[in-house]
Image (spheres, grey):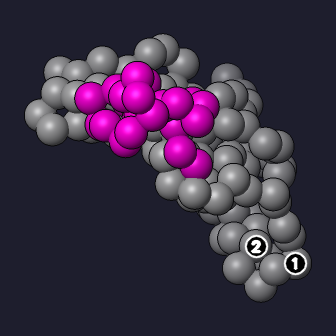
Amino acid sequence: MSSPMWYINVYRVSRAFGGHEEGGWYYDDGTFIQEAGQTPNEAAAQELKNKILEHIKKGKINFSLEQNQMGMNPYDGADPSGYGDDNYLIKGGKWGDEKIKVYVQNHKGRDFPEERQYYE
């Protein structure tokens, strides 16, 4: 039996609007950017992840990020007259600043979530 492979995956992560239930809720929406490495050893994968995060922190690795995202389009969160109204937020609209996240995973990188999120 072969050892599982551990992948170091880099993502651009945003907060996306999920719905109006309970005063509004959000979820993480990740866009896969690149695989930064792979190894059959989980400890080695964690070590590589930490090195990558350190390089990002020191500015040795840079990714372009969207700042101050405001929904799906200019009309997201605006009533028919164009005034801001949270009752008109579009589900899935991304809000705030994107962040870079690095994960050690047992699969190749892929966008997440894979299915539309629902309030439970």
**Residue nearest the observer in this picture, 61 or 41:** 61
Amino acid type, residue under disc 2 in the picture: Ile
Q: Closest to the observer: 88 or 115?
A: 88
Q: What mark, if any, has residue 56 been given in the picture?
A: 2
Q: As drawn, is 42 to the left or to the right of 78?
A: right
SS type, badge 2: helix
- Magenta stretch containing residue 57, yes or no? no
- Residue at point 73% right, 56% down? 65
- In the rendered image, is residue 30 in sight? yes
Residue 76 locus on image (x, y percent): 48, 31
Count every numbered label the image shows and give the total.
2
Can you say which quadrant of the picture contains the C terminus? Answer: top left
Q: Which numbered marker is on residue 116? A: none
The image quarter in which residue 50 lies: bottom right
- Secondary structure mostly taken by the magenta-highlighted segment of the chain: loop
Q: Which residue is mark 1?
A: 60
22 and 118: which is toward the camera: 22
Residue 107 picture location, percent across and down = 66, 30
Q: From this viewpoint, which residue is outermost toward the right? A: 60
The residue range painted magenta reads 69-91
> Badge 1: few (under 14), some or many (20 or more) residues near its Cα, within 10 Å?
few
Is residue 81 located in the magenta-colored stretch of the structure? Answer: yes
Residue drawn where x is 69% and y is 70% of the image: 53
- Name the amino acid, label 1: Lys
Farthest residue to the front: give it.
81
Q: Secondary structure at mark 1?
A: loop
Residue sticking out furthest to the top = 115
Residue 6's quadrant in the figure? top right
Residue 16, x across and y down, in percent = 46, 37
